[in-house]
Image (tube, coloured by chain):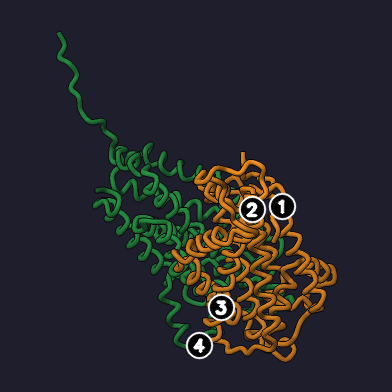
Chain colours: A orange, B green
Amino acid sequence: MVPPASSPRPPSASPGAQLAPPAGAPRARDLGLVNWRGLWTLYAKEVRRFLNVSTQTILAPVVTSLLFLAIFTLALGRTVRTLGSVSFAEFLTPGLIMMAILQNAFANTSSSLVISKLQGNIVDLLMPPLSPGEQALGLAGGGVTRGLIVGVAVGVAMWAFIPIGVYDPVFVVFHAVNASLMLALLGMVGGIWSEKFDHIAAVTNFIITPLSFLSGTFYSIERLPDNWHLFALLNPFFYLIDGFRYGFIGHADGSLWVGALVVLTVNAGLWTLVHRMIATGYRLKP
Amino acid sequence: MEPPPVLAPRSFGWLNGRGLWTLVYRDLRRYWKYGVESIGGPIVSSLLFLAVFVLALGGQGEASGGLSFVQFVAPGIAMFALMHSGFSNGAVPLVYDKHEGMIQDVLAAPLNAAEVAAGYGLSATLNGLVTGLVVLAAMMPFVALPLGHPLVALLFALLGAVLFGLAGVLIGLWAAKWDHYSAAESFLILPLGVLSGAFFPLDGLPGPARTLILFNPAFHAIDGVRYGLTGYAAWAPGASLVILLVVDLALAALAWRLFAIGYKIKP
């Protein structure tokens, strides 16, 4: 990853400089192409931040997902027996895992940024010799890690009740990683934009929750009326859930290749946006 | 020459009405100030729940007592919003006041323990009740509810709001950090609210679970409200009423006692 010209990184000491500093004089540290130590430190801080309160960040989502499973199997189990060849519980389980991944990846980066901004320790992110790309990668990495850990934890807990097999692990991993990344990046966009907790709460309540609920987690979109069916196809979360579910049950509602393309395009777009926000200091620097 | 007036403590009568109202009003204003979160959030999530239940069922399906599933679940969704809102409006102000040290303002005011407990409990109850009513109103365009006994529904909703408001106050007193509040919400309040028959009919449950659910006071509040709104109750509403009154009184007595001894709020 090549840092852009506007990077705050200290210039590399060039051996051909005209004015060679006297021996022993202080000079800018050479960090090389990537500041690996800085990147790792930021990433490790983001991961420790949620592991420190793992009851809230890992165990709580597991309990919430099991409660969802209980509600839907008890409420609908009798009426909706099967969808095609799979039982409703088997259809639901991958959706619930994915929903936990989405919500937690988003919560990690958004809360980290909003809290840092409110408490003023955002300078600890802005001051170190990290390029915008490194800052974005470190923060997003924390969100992705939380999304994946929560996904595995929820999956294992659900498996105790609904022993579901894996049909194609490639799709499971691809969509889990891309879902975590997409929501971690969205969380960063929301966190950078928000100036108060109210703002990020509004983004969560009015954008993220509706998109994740209306994405085919709980129902097959083939059940939807035509215009709603089209609306579901415009929701990028639908492709995350649909592809992820295909990895488990071997059946998808939409096209898998379109889905993978949409997911990768959205992530590339979000990455560009986040990089740009950090590079210009939008709502981060005075 | 007249003797100087004797200085005596101000007399408030048997109830410091103005002080109590000030405390209640403060938290009602706090609720309105964050209206986007406190009312907008539950409306959106409740309508999403309703939409998901309708879509997952593909329209209609019959639940208990001749109700369609949507008619069955709508009172449950409103009650879930009410209970969750009652809990958080009971706990958050207390945790916040303790965290920021503003609890001193309450302790130093001429309010006795019963008035402080009532102040925190009452604002939580009212905020929860408003949330539940607004959510119900928001769902009305989508669900046909007979509304057979609206006053019965209101009474059970009130008792449910008191139940979770006081539970919130007790947890707010106990919680030393926000982590504790979140833990109580995730591991106690959400399970009680969800595993209460709010979202599923009792006859879908296996035998022992059907008995176990009767020990969840949230079930009685929800069943009573559902009886008032739809005319269908899974259990005896009269007995539910008695159970709710007893549990509410017990929680109120506990809250009073804890404020009186200054549990975790006085040095």
Q: Residue at x 52, y 46 (%)?
A: A23
Residue that protrudes farthest toward the top in the picture: B1
Q: Which numbered mark, 3 or 1, is in the foreground of this view? A: 1
- Discs 4 and 1 share one subunit: no
Identity, as a three-letter code, of the amino acid under mark 2: Ser
Where residue A140 sits, quadrant-wise, is bottom right
Q: Earlier in the sequence, mark 2 or mark 3?
A: 2
* Measured Cα–Cα span from mark 3 to mark 1: 36 Å
* Measured Cα–Cα span from mark 1 to mark 2: 8 Å
Q: Residues within 10 Å of mark 3 (few under 14, many from 20)?
A: some
Left-right relation of B47 to B165: right
Residue B34's tag is none
Residue A152's tag is 3
Identity, as a three-letter code, of the amino acid under mark 4: Pro
Residue to which mark 2 is pinned = A131
Residue to which mark 4 is pinned = B206
Q: Quadrant of the N terminus of chain A?
A: bottom right
Parent chain of label 1? A
Indicate the secondary structure of the residue bearing disc 1: loop
Q: Nearer the viewer, residue B260 or A39?
A: A39
- Callouts 1 and 2 close, C-beta under 8 Å: yes
Residue to which mark 1 is pinned = A4
Q: Residue at x 84, y 68 (%)?
A: A227
Q: Residue at x 33, y 46 (%)?
A: B115
* Measured Cα–Cα span from mark 2 to mark 3: 32 Å
